[in-house]
Amino acid sequence: MDSLNSIFGIIIIVCGLYCIYACITMKKTGEINKTILMSKGMEGQQCKDAKAYIQEAIPQVMLLGISAMIYGGADMFNYHIFSLGFFNIVIMVLFFIVLIWVGFKLTRLRKKYY
């Protein structure tokens, strides 16, 4: 069971790193990251104002990346070094709250710019 928990923690950390990488790349290139910011069937050329869309989306995606890395790191720490007990559950709940909030915010941005 510990190996499954390790894999889950690593996957969450990698997802967080990818979100942060996507933010940095979008800021540098000015191109929309299709994996994170577009739904299936959407094209970047359909966006009304790509620069404004990226500008508004970056803080949410960065928050998601940071919270994913914190949760993944805490999860790994919890299972391999020292049990965090109830604190681990609190971190997990906060991560899922951030995940849902970012999902709603990005959906609103898609409706606004597409």
Image (cartoon, grey):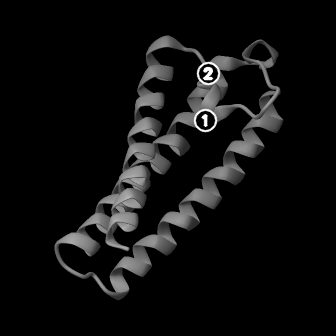
Residue 86's label in the rendered image is none
Residue at point 32%, 71% (across, down): 2
For the residues labelled 2 and 1, the Cα–Cα distance comes to: 9 Å
Q: Secondary structure at mark 2?
A: loop
In the image, 54 versus 76, the foreground residue is 76
Q: Determine whether, in the image, residue 83 is placed left or right of residue 63.
A: left
Q: Pointer 1: what residue?
A: 36
Residue 38 occupies which quadrant of the picture? top right
Residue 93 location (% of width, % of height): 51, 74
Q: Is residue 32 above or below residue 96?
A: above
Q: Amino acid at mark 1?
A: Ile
Residue 106 location (% of width, % of height): 68, 43
Q: Amino acid at mark 2?
A: Ile
Residue at point 41%, 72% (across, down): 91
| Quadrant (top left/top right/bottom left/bottom right) for the N terminus | bottom left
In the image, 15 versus 52, the foreground residue is 15
In the image, 43 versus 80, the foreground residue is 80
Q: Determine whether, in the image, residue 89 is placed left or right of residue 99.
A: left
Residue 33 location (% of width, % of height): 59, 25
Residue 32's label in the rendered image is 2
Q: Are marks 2 and 1 in contact (CB under 8 Å)?
A: no
Q: Secondary structure at mark 1?
A: helix
